């Protein structure tokens, strides 16, 4: 009857993540060593290996070294840390692409009409939105090398608006390469998008409004695809990034499976907050209409290794490896059904699942409380952000990271203050959004987003719920608060397990939940079958106490 067995229930976490966190609790945020036990995959080890505990709050002395004792180091400085090498953030984006490896000449193809954005998809044609058509008559399209000064302007010859959707193509009087030599148009996507694109990180760009009310500067934002319908592709800024006024008509980029940079949509509309959902008219759906005006879309060929090295990277779903291959061209490998993308001896590549040193955990990683776990070069790494005065936060480009913070106990998941969603953003700063401004309420969305604006809303109550006496309360699938009085069924409210959260349990467990409690040196907890288990710690010459935040109470030395 080992309580450690219950660790497999921990809130739906991947078993590798559970073990990494368990080890991390002992190692104070250390990287899991690459040396493996016979019973574990490479990159994993247990506390039984006898690790040296490295403390961040104690100094070393030469006396310790002279006696042959291990010199302690500051784990917060020398320990594992995820270094995403992010561009400094502005309110709506970054100064350069962070996910799609565009060349500089390709970024020059993004231009402005002086109130809307567009993209050169060929030397004489621009993709934009039809609601920007007041620029078509007597207007100019301006591009430039300097993102703050698009000073090369070309007169508009004609504009063509789609009759039903918010999409337009604009013909220019001159070849753009005559006014900006070297500029490289980005062609439209010539394959079809489907639900497999959901969750893919793509890159948006525009010349719209910034947080300081600045305007007319080219900026980028990397965001996941949240929704696809027949006409639009929707990306989600998750309260941190987004398109804004003046970005209309702006492009949405991707790196295709054959290593080509393509535009997949033009911005139609978005959330008034400028950090929410943004809707782009799909070019794959209307490709034939576009090409009726512009002519056939030529193949662009593989992309040069701009910002991509030989080590490479994995996509968000661990199904593709992208790296710099032969002839300095980007190589993309799609993993077979028995493979996934992970770290190998040559970099990030497709490896057989059984040989994955990170056991399915990605470089993006995850936060468990304030502990960051991610797949790094060599295997799994963990860092206790809180112990280093940091907060574990989510960033669209880098995944989960530790950042210096002014957020106190507030995490990236945040909380609801009435109808206001409050969270710690990727810069380690407190941010908020009043959901009532959009006619919504604040509620819990999911583990990736945390608390945000929802229809209806559950306040601070999430899917896992809580007990109010015999009544269990939780947030349902429609973001509506649901309740059951367990007493009406002859049961008590308690923690069912870490996947389902709180629910009605057999009366035997009463108020005792999964984490348990101590009473006269006897530890009690409710197991996954809803049965009360107890262990007398005196019999093992131990004391009942808190083992750790994952396992709760148990017998400890």
Image (cartoon, helix red, strand yellow):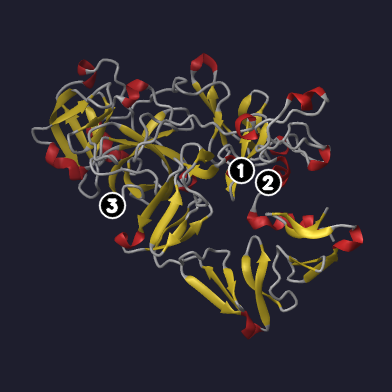
Residue picked out by circle 1: 387
Mark 3 or 1: the one toward you? 1
Q: Earlier in the sequence, mark 2 or mark 3?
A: 2
Q: Disc 3 designates what residue?
A: 272
Q: Which numbered disc covers residue 21?
A: 2
Name of the residue lying farthest toward the left: 138
Mark 2, other Cα within 10 Å: few <14 / some 14–19 / many ≥20: many
Horizontally, is 556 left or right of 468 in the view?
Answer: right
Could you say whether the residue bearing mark 1 is in a helix, strand or loop? helix
Distance between mark 1 and mark 2 Cα atoms: 14 Å
Q: Are marks 3 and 1 in contact (CB under 8 Å)?
A: no
Where 546 sits versus 97, above or below?
below
Give residue 418's mark: none
- The reply, left or right, for residue 38 in relation to residue 144 is right
Q: Looking at the picture, how far across and down is residue 182, in whole percent?
A: 30, 16
For the point 22% across and 21% down, which residue is it?
Answer: 176
CA–CA distance in space, label 3 to label 1: 38 Å
Q: In this rendering, which labeled residue sits more in front, label 2 or label 3?
A: 2
Picture quadrant of residue 185: top left
- Alpha-carbon distance for marks 2 and 3? 39 Å
Category of crowding for the residue at label 1, using alpha-carbon neighbours closer than 10 angstroms: few (below 14), some (14–19), many (at least 20) = some
Q: Which mark sits nearer the N-terminus, 3 or 1?
A: 3
């Amino acid at each position: 009857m080992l309580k450690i067995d219950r660790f497999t229930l921990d809130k739906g976490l991947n078993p590798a993540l559970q073990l990494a966190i368990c080890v991390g609790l002992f190692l104070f945020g250390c990287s899991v060593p690459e040396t493996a036990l016979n019973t574990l995959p490479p990159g994993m080890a247990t506390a039984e290996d006898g690790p040296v505990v490295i403390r961040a709050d104690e100094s070393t002395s030469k006396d310790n070294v002279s006696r042959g004792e291990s010199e302690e180091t500051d784990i917060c400085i020398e320990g594992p840390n995820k270094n995403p090498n992010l561009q400094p953030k502005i309110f709506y984006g970054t100064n350069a692409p962070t996910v799609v490896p565009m060349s500089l000449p390709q970024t020059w193809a993004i231009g402005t009409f002086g109130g809307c954005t567009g993209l050169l998809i060929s030397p004489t044609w621009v993709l934009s939105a039809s609601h920007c058509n007041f620029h078509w008559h007597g207007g100019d399209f301006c591009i430039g090398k300097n993102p703050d000064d698009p000073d090369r302007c070309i007169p508009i010859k004609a504009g063509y608006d789609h009759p039903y959707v918010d999409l337009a193509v604009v013909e220019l009087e001159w070849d753009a390469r005559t006014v900006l030599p070297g500029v490289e148009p980005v062609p439209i996507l010539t394959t079809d998008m489907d639900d497999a694109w959901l969750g893919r990180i793509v890159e948006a760009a525009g010349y719209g409004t910034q947080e300081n009310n600045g305007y007319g500067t080219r900026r980028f934002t990397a965001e996941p695809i949240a929704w696809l319908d027949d006409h639009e592709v929707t990306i989600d800024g998750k309260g941190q990034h987004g398109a804004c006024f003046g970005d209309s008509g702006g492009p949405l980029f991707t790196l295709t499976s054959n290593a080509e940079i393509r535009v997949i949509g033009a911005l139609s509309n978005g959330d008034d907050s400028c950090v929410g959902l943004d809707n782009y008219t799909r070019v794959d759906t209307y490709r034939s209409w576009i090409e009726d005006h512009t002519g056939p879309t030529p193949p662009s060929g593989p992309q040069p290794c701009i910002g991509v090295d030989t080590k490479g990277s994995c996509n968000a779903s661990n199904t593709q490896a992208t790296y710099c291959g032969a002839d300095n061209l980007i190589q993309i490998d799609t993993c077979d059904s028995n493979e996934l993308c992970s770290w190998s001896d040559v970099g990030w590549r497709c490896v057989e699942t059984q040989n994955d040193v990170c056991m399915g955990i990605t470089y993006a990683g995850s936060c468990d409380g304030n502990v960051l776990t991610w797949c790094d070069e060599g295997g799994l790494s963990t860092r206790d952000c809180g112990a280093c005065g940091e907060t574990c936060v989510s960033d669209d480009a880098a995944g989960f990271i530790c950042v210096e913070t002014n957020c106190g106990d507030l995490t990236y998941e945040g909380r609801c203050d009435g109808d206001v969603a409050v969270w710690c953003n990727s810069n380690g700063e407190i941010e908020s959004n009043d959901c009532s401004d959009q006619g919504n309420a604040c509620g819990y969305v999911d583990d990736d987003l945390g608390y945000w604006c929802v229809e209806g809303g559950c306040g601070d109550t999430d899917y896992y719920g809580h007990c109010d006496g015999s009544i269990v309360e939780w947030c349902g699938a429609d973001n509506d608060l649901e309740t059951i009085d367990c007493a009406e069924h002859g049961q008590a409210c308690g923690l069912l397990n870490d996947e389902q959260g709180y629910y009605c349990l057999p009366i035997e467990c009463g108020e005792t939940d999964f984490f348990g409690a101590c009473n006269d040196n006897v530890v009690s907890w409710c197991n996954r079958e809803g049965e009360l288990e107890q262990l007398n710690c005196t019999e093992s010459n131990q004391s009942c106490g808190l083992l750790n935040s994952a396992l709760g109470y148990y017998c400890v030395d």
